[in-house]
Amino acid sequence: MVLGTVYAVLFYFAVAIFAVGLAFRIRLYARTPAPLKIPTTPAPVTQAGVVVRMAKEVVFFESLFKANKWTWLFGWIFHAALLLVLLRHLRYFTEPVWFWVGWVQPFGMYAGFAMTAGLAGLWVRRFTVERVRYISSPSDHLMLLLLIGIAATGLMMKYVAHTDILSLKAFILGLLYFDWQPIPADPVLLVHLALVLILLIIFPFSKLLHAPGVFFSPGRNQVDNPREKRHFVPQTKLPGK
Amino acid sequence: MADFDTPEITIPLEIPTLNRGAMNHSSPFPAAPNHQEALGFPGELVDNWQTKAIDKLGELLSRSRALQVYMDGCVKCGACTDKCHYFLGTGDPKNMPVARQDLLRKVYRRYFTFAGKYFPWLVGAEDLTKEVLDDWYTYFHQCSQCRRCSVYCPYGIDTAEVSMAAREIMDHIGKGQKYCNEIIGKVHKIGNNLGLPEPALIDTLEGLEEDIQEETGVVVRLPVNQKGADILLVTPSADFFAEPHVDGLIGYAKVFHQAGVSWTVSSYASEAANFAMFIGSYEQMQKIAERIRKAAEDLGVKRIIFGECGHAWRVAYNFMNTLAGPFDFLDQNYPIPQHICEFTNDLIEKGELTLDKSRNDHMTLTFHDSCNVARGSRMGDSPGGQFTIPRAIIKACCNNFYDMAADTINENTFCCGGGGGLLTDDLLEIRTKGAAPRMQALKEVVDEHGVTHMAAICAICKSQFSKVMPKYGFDMDNIVSVHQLVSNAIVLDGQTTGDNAKVE
């Protein structure tokens, strides 16, 4: 039960840091004025057009596709697979399991491999492409290592050393309903969960902020209509004004 | 300045291997104390520059969502690394857009983020040292703020915004650039970048009227400060005297003449280019924009039209309404402001101009999309009008036109190499090397289609190309104004003389 308590405390701590940290960051982005119209043109001339542009950016990584096909391929595979894997994991958090989560299961299983392959491709580029090597900091490598660690331990539990999934689900539901249960003392599971908690904790302090950030990028989210509609942000504070 | 070799043109364009420190020696002349002080900046590097720079960075972060999001959001994916013309021309890794941003981002991380404060080695955070400041001055003056990198960034991170912020910080600690700050001072004092006073302007335009009459036999007016005119033309001051710019100005005058509209230039606002954008100063940019508003009000015009000028059009199109608007005293039936290409194209579409294309048969044209028009503005009603309208004008005036390769035009266009405050002789090396990608694309259509001339709609592009094209084996007059082509082709009512006299 000691182990369960430690993980329970860590879980609440990590989720709190993640949620509060992210909320503060999003509030900062939302409150910081965008004093001028700076969409990268050609840009949509209506708000609906901006929604389409952002959707293409977030779902298909359109700009990255224009830039570099390999980075796009690895990056898109990783993100798409991560989404499937996350959806698949909902079955550990819901009782009864939502019906559509069942549909995702078969895809989610293979997505684990796709996610690892995408991450590996991105990491290989960090070493082999001279330009990308130059701009990489230790944190850029460690972030990939962390994600690969999460994916690898997850795959191990599925294909090598099964964990007691019923006890794990009881533990997780216990966290959600404040009815704490013991956690299976399975080393691979414990490493997997620890890495996920680390990811949650560093999320609001790292480049993972690209996830909320993309929605606030004026280059992408502004409507191209400065002549038709005057853009003026009253909270723009200027020295001496 | 050290001697340097003009890059070899390779077809196809090769992405260079990294050549560390290749352009480390290239810094622009610093602004003199009087240039700085005229704009309210400290004359020389202040004693507590480090603290002041960090404070200023904090202030800019709180004033610009773009800067805040762009500082946080980069994942170092490398998408932009091979997109900058200065990197392609020099191989200096600090000319890769992400690496250029990182010069500021590492300082941001050190002083404004948890990770950078406590684990600087982990996230590449660094103290703001004299070496870092010198790198800022060197490499933020090797960015022409052309936004090409931002097209390819999955988050739309725009290095132009970052380099504007860095220049603004440097201005506020007394480390300004001579070229931009001296010019902005001239605009505040006299009204244009050149420091051309009213009598000289009047004299110049009278001379052009005589030239047109001599050429065509028609009296075409180029009025200055004419109260009650319908249209205020705001054009880059280079249009008043430089080649091939002035041929474009003659083209505007002929179009206005044929349209039968009354127009004028203003000596008070005799400059379209707003160099304050280059130094990232909202306040300076606003002061210059307000000159145009004042000129329009004083002259009682109904419309404002901008001449061929790339950065001017970005500021006019995107920012002027914000900075100096609302322009409710102007005629709301016309776009405010309007681009001269929009004006001319409307007349062409309505069939109101007689254009003799054969007058341009001695040329085979291509079109260079100017970066700030392409990626920072629009013409017409639909996205991409900034690409189609100038081409429509060229095709209406010329029989021979070929576009350059698709990844070098439209939103993918390469900067000429002289934009963003770099059009100065002390930066000739980086200008020349930065022009290499455009010269390569031009060389391809010259070889394949026999292209003889490249047209542009930006004063900086025109000046830059006339200077660097000879280094790549072209002639300096291979660069032409779009309205120069209009000027050649247009048949004026009553035209009797000259090489484009009306064929009866």
Image (spheres, coloured by chain):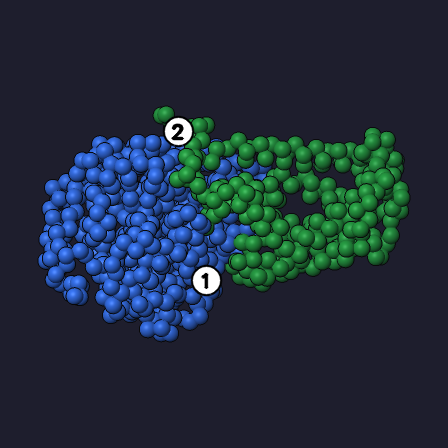
> Whole-percent x and y of residue B223?
16, 44
Closer mark to the observer between disc 2 and disc 1: 1
Q: Quadrant of the C terminus of chain B?
A: bottom left
- From the top left corner, tell me how far across and down residue B494 is, in percent: 14, 57
Q: Which chain is green?
A: A
Q: Is residue B247 among what the camera can see? A: yes
Disc 1 element: helix
Letter of the blue chain: B
Res. A238 mark: 2
Q: Is residue B283 above or below residue B258?
A: above
Residue B39 visible here? no
Q: Is residue B401 above or below residue B189?
A: below
- The residue carrying pointer 1 sits among few (fewer than 14), some (14 to 19) or many (20 or more) residues within 10 Å by Cα, namely few
Q: Nearer the viewer, residue B23 or B69?
A: B69
Quadrant of residue B480 in the image? bottom left
Q: Position of residue A167 (x, y in %)?
A: 89, 42
Mark 2 falls on what kind of element? loop
Badge 1: chain ID: B
Whether pointer 2 and pointer 1 mark residues with C-beta atoms closer than 8 Å, the reply is: no
Are callouts 2 and 1 both on one chain? no
State the residue at coordinates (30%, 49%): B343
